[in-house]
Image (spheres, rainbow, N blue to C red):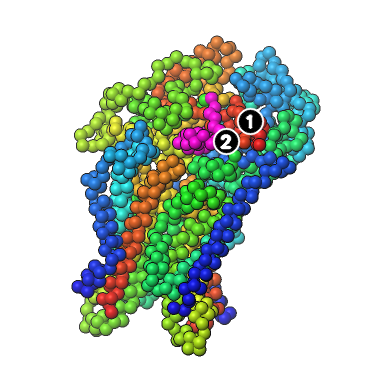
């Protein structure tokens, strides 16, 4: 474990990315204390202003404080991303382990189902689900979870398969340890680090997907603040006030890069330990 | 060889069946009575008689499995119903929008090759040097870039400020550049790294050492042997990405007002045009599966090991 | 290292050269196309519209667009400046003393674009196919009043009415549905409502190329009987959103922006301020308003409706969203329209009064809660708007933010245009963006439509059902349309409009105008009396 920590810390990019993630988490957790203004307060007489002491990044087309909206948007984007990931894992981990550990026809059935669900491009399937459920943040989360769990469950099943035949599991089986105990005591700890890496490798992609949906108008509804939606809102003004579009896009880019770097560094570090 | 293809084709049948089943079920999850939705969309007052008559006409009074069989029978004959919105055949609309999307996707594939090839090569050759580090950063940014934002940046700087390209829509060859650049950008990073990794692997292979021992010049080795061998994973990957890109067009087409499948799909969702949503989903699912199949078959031509495995 | 550095540099440079040539090649192709406006080349005007022009059928509605229907099809009589009825396809007409018979003398030099003759028989055939689908056109009272149509001789056509209907001639000027297609356009079933074989009209333009959802090209009708257009071709490109339209305009991909709501007010102001282009704003055409759905429990209360009227900061919207380009509206119809100059007290912006009215209506502010409540229910109102309409969106978001300060929770629902209207007709909204229909429809056709219950009437019918006086209003509207006495008509209109105003069911916002933005080489942009007509005929390109 010490080794991991050392490796993590020595990684320069890792340091930067975890710093960014830390700051973003702060922004997401305490927007009321950090945002200078009410993100939804409309004052149309102050629309499209440049930066000032009251509005550090200026105002949008309705005179709302851009900085405050960016900060509240962090909560929406990160919160939604983690919620999607969390819910997905709650489905994928049990199902993946069950299919992998049980094997036989259960596994066969599971794999065929995966084949079919994964035959659709995931973005399209989520979109179609939203089309049927109707736009809105709740439906967006539901649609994303329903589509994404398949992929993770399949990966987790693969992890279980590779662990299953290892000696310590076989030994436990021979000793007559109940299956549930084997799963909880042996299999889960053996795969959990890989799952964590998987989550962090992909969370950036989830943030990206959520902002894309919001950009198309399928995510959070006004007056809520979300980066993708802010970009969509700023479309009419992007020549006279390009900064309106630049800031939220930069936020997305920074967060996603940070998560991707973090995920990759985490993977490298944990791989080292396995060796 | 023939055996392998036959085998892959048969494995396709249950998947296609599954796709159709999911598409069908999805649409039956829609809230409300489809007959009422249809009447409202056609501006006919949904009186009880009208609804009852339409339910019979649309076969909604039959049990679900019978409806499915009927629907599938029609779908196989390319009859996907009628769009609520345009009142035209769903299949005709899809055909109208499919070609622009294919065009965009092909252009993006070409861009991916044209851009990732040199960058990947250079960063493999100068492994660990500044160029390599730089390409790593570019790769990271490209994977993390929100496509809709990147599209606007391109429009703002290349089109509005520098006046290099037309802004939107479809028409001349120049119209294709910005959308395909946006679509391909996310993949460029991936393929640069992929090519670099596969080249590094091959550079250490015994055949390279042997070639060098025979006194072949470095450039010749790289261009004739290493590159050729390293391209294999890139090309197969591209085949897979082609299907993925077909779904990535949803955003790019919205940003650039490109009249393709993505736009058709988004519009039908926004208008709750259920037959169109269903048709698009089914069509794209089938295309996606077929793409992957073609990649598999192509790969088996290039790498006989897979074929042998399949024949065993 | 396998490559020598110098070799590498050469290959990189080579690659860059290739890329540059590639890029330059692309941009050159566009430049070349722009420079092709030589003298012998045809004069082309490029225009854009937010949606497809539809199947170009004058007897049907969506997805048909007003402007494109008006390019190809023509009326018997034309709505001129100031509402003057001018001869068009009919050279002259006689009205019987009882006002029930109209005889039209048709022009004899008119031919359809396929060369077939325009005569009384084809006029009758067109009227009859429209009348066969009368329920589709219920909003238009004339359709309901037509008893029979007659061919008197080759160039004389007679219309018999059930009752003397005073706006008959005015309604004949409408862009749809009483305009004429040629014999060759009729489908086998002879029912044009099912679609045309091809769009054959008498108008100055002929559809020559059509790519659905991409572009439509209209060519000048060389055998047109009237003043021939100055340009040879009009290209209509489909560009769904306003921002893309502005970008395309700035890049000279389109020559002209024309219409209402086709670009945002911000973009219009931006283009105007740049000084690089010509801009024009028309006289007010119609009234932009909010419609309250009196069927909803909360809105049923006139106190709440009045509170909303007083709570709305109209001036702020005019100044900041419209940049003063649209004028403030206090009544449903602009006072310069016929019969609409009524004397009523406008609802002034008065937050205190609004609060007081809300309290009186039982919606109380509760400590610690952001929104007012009544019997444990939160004051939430659903505002429906068209997602692609920038102006509606801006006003909607403004209302949401501004009403929040008063403790009113506005839920915004945005829908695509087609879905929006379906929802509107179903009455699934509290507040709805609407607009009066403009000349030549205001006020009589607009009022006529609000009395029609079917889905071909207007969403206002259902929305007003919660008014106690609804029945009475409808009766009066029906009466005024058939009244032959000018004084009585004046009185009835005043009565109807005053009741609607006092019931506070419409919240007039502004008088909307058409805007035109065009490059300096374009001339002849005049606003035509009918809001939806684009002056393609008079436009010239230098």
Between the residue at mark 2 and the residue at mark 1, the CA separation in whole angstroms equals 11 Å
Q: Residues within 10 Å of mark 1 (few under 14, many from 20)?
A: few
Residue C31: image location, x then y, percent: 61, 49
For the N terminus of chain A, give its image quadrant: bottom left
Residue C370 drawn at (x, y percent): 26, 36
**A152, above or below C76, in the image:** below
Give a yes or no on whether discs 2 and 1 share a subunit. Answer: yes
Residue C253: percent from the left, percent from the top?
A: 58, 44
**Looking at the image, which residue is at 45% across and 36% down?**
C266
Q: Nearer the viewer, residue C287 or A158?
A: C287
Q: Which residues are magenta?
A: C257-283
- Dot 1 falls on which chain? C
User: In the figure, is residue C31 to the left or right of C116?
Assistant: left
Relative placement, left or right, of B186 versus C484 is left
In the picture of the structure, the residue carrying the numbered disc 2 is C518
The quarter of the image holding the C terminus of chain A is bottom left
In the image, residue C270 lies in the stretch drawn in magenta: yes
Residue for point 47% across, 52% down: B154
Q: Which residue is mark 1?
A: C524
Magenta span includes C98: no
First along the sequence among labels 2 and 1: 2
Q: Secondary structure at mark 2?
A: strand
Q: Residues within 10 Å of mark 2 (few under 14, many from 20)?
A: many
**Residue at x 46% of width, y 64% of height:** B188
């Amino acid at each position: 474990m010490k080794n991991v920590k050392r490796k993590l810390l020595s990684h320069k990019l890792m340091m930067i990315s975890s710093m960014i993630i830390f700051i973003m988490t702060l922004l997401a957790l305490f927007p009321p204390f950090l945002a200078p203004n009410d993100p939804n307060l409309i004052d149309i007489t102050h629309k499209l202003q440049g930066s000032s002491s009251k509005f550090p990044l200026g105002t949008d087309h309705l005179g709302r404080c851009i900085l405050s909206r960016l900060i509240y948007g962090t909560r929406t984007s990160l919160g939604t991303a983690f919620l999607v990931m969390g819910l997905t894992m709650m489905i994928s981990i049990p199902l993946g382990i069950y299919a992998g550990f049980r094997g036989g026809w259960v596994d066969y059935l599971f794999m065929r189902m995966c084949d079919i669900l994964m035959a659709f491009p995931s973005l399209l399937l989520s979109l179609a689900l939203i089309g049927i459920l109707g736009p809105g943040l709740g439906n967006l989360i539901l649609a994303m979870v329903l589509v994404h769990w398949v992929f993770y469950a399949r990966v987790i099943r693969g992890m279980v398969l590779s662990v299953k035949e290892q000696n310590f599991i076989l030994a436990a089986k021979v000793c007559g340890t109940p299956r549930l105990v084997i799963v909880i005591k042996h299999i889960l700890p053996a795969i959990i680090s890989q799952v964590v890496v998987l989550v962090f490798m992909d969370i950036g992609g989830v943030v990206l997907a959520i902002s894309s949906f919001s950009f198309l108008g399928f995510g959070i509804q006004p007056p809520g603040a979300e980066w993708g939606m802010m970009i969509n809102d700023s479309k009419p003004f992007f020549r006279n006030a390009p900064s309106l579009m630049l800031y939220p896009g930069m936020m997305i880019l920074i967060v996603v890069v940070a998560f991707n770097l973090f995920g990759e560094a985490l993977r490298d570090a944990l791989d080292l330990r396995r060796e | 060889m023939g055996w392998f293809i036959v085998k892959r084709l048969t494995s396709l049948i249950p998947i296609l069946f599954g796709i159709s089943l999911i598409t069908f079920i999805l649409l039956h999850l829609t809230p409300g009575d489809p007959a009422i939705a249809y009447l409202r969309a056609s501006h006919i007052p949904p009186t009880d008689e009208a609804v009852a008559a339409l339910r019979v006409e649309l076969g909604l009074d039959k049990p679900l499995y019978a409806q499915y069989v009927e629907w599938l029978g029609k779908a196989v004959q390319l009859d996907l119903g009628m769009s609520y919105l345009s009142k035209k055949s769903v299949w005709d609309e899809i055909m109208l929008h499919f070609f622009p999307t294919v065009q965009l996707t092909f252009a993006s594939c070409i861009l991916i090759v044209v851009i990732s090839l040199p960058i990947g090569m250079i960063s493999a050759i100068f492994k660990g040097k500044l160029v390599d580090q730089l390409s790593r950063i570019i790769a990271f940014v490209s994977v993390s870039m929100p496509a809709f934002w990147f599209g606007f940046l391109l429009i703002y700087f290349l089109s509005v400020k520098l006046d290099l390209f037309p802004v939107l829509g479809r028409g001349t060859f120049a119209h294709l550049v910005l959308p395909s650049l946006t679509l391909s950008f996310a993949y460029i990073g991936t393929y640069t790294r992929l090519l670099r990794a596969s080249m590094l692997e091959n550079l250490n292979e015994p055949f390279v050492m042997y070639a060098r021992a025979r006194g072949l010049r470095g450039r010749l080795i790289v261009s004739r042997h290493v590159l050729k061998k390293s391209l294999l994973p890139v090309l197969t990957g591209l085949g897979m990405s082609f299907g993925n890109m077909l779904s990535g067009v949803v955003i790019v087409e919205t940003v650039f007002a490109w009249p393709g499948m993505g736009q058709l799909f988004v519009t039908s969702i926004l208008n709750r045009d259920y037959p169109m949503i269903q048709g698009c989903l089914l069509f794209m699912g089938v295309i996606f599966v077929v793409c992957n199949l073609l990649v598999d078959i192509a790969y088996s031509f290039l790498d006989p090991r897979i074929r042998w495995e399949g024949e065993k | 290292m396998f490559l020598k550095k110098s070799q590498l540099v050469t290959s990189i440079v080579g690659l860059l050269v290739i890329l540059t040539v590639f890029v330059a090649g692309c941009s050159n192709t566009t430049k070349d196309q722009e420079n092709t406006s030589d003298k012998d080349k045809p004069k082309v005007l490029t225009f854009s519209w937010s949606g497809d022009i539809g199947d170009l059928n004058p007897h049907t509605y969506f997805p048909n667009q007003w402007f494109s229907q008006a390019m190809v099809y023509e009326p018997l009589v034309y709505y001129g400046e100031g509402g003057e009825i001018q001869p068009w396809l009919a050279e002259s007409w006689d009205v019987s003393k009882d006002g029930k018979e109209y005889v039209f003398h048709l022009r004899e030099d008119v031919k359809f674009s396929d060369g077939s003759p325009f005569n009384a028989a084809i006029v009758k055939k067109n009227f009859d196919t429209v009348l066969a689908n009368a329920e589709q056109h219920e909003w238009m009272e004339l359709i309901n009043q037509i008893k029979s149509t007659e061919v008197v001789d080759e160039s004389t056509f007679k219309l018999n009415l059930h009752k003397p209907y005073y706006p008959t001639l005015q309604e004949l000027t409408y862009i749809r549905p009483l305009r004429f297609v040629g014999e060759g356009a009729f489908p086998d079933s002879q029912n044009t409502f099912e679609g045309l074989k091809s769009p054959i009209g008498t108008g100055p333009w002929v559809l020559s190329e059509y790519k659905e959802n991409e572009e439509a090209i209209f060519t000048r009708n060389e055998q047109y009987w009237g003043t021939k257009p100055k340009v040879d071709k009009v290209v209509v490109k489909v560009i769904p959103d306003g921002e893309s339209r502005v970008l395309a305009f700035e890049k000279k991909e389109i020559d002209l922006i024309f219409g209402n709501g086709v670009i945002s007010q911000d973009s219009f102001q931006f283009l105007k301020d740049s000084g690089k282009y010509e801009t024009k704003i028309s006289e007010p055409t119609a009234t932009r308003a909010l419609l309250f759905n009196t069927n909803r429990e909360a809105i049923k209360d006139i106190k709440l409706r009045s509170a909303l009227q007083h709570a709305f900061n109209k001036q702020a919207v005019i100044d900041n969203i419209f940049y003063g380009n649209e004028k403030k509206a206090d009544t449903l119809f602009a006072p310069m329209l016929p019969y609409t100059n009524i004397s009523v007290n406008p609802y002034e912006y008065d937050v205190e009064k609004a609060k007081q009215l809300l309290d009186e209506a039982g919606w109380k502010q509760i400590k610690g809660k952001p929104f007012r409540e009544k019997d444990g229910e939160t004051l939430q109102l659903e505002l429906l708007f068209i997602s692609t309409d920038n102006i509606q969106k801006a006003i909607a978001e403004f209302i949401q933010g501004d009403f929040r300060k008063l403790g009113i929770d506005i839920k915004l629902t945005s829908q695509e245009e087609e879905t929006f209207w379906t929802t509107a007709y179903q009455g699934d909204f509290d507040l709805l963006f609407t607009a009066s229909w403009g000349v030549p429809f205001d006020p009589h056709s607009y009022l006529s439509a609000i009395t029609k219950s079917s889905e071909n009437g207007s969403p206002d019918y259902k929305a007003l059902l919660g008014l106690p006086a609804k029945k009475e209003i409808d009766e009066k509207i029906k009466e005024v349309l058939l009244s032959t006495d000018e004084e009585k008509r004046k009185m009835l209109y005043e009565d109807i409009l005053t009741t609607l105003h006092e019931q506070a069911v419409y919240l007039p916002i502004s008088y909307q105008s058409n805007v035109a933005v065009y490059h300096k080489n374009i001339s002849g942009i005049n606003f035509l009396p009918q809001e939806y007509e684009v002056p393609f005929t008079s436009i010239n390109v230098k």
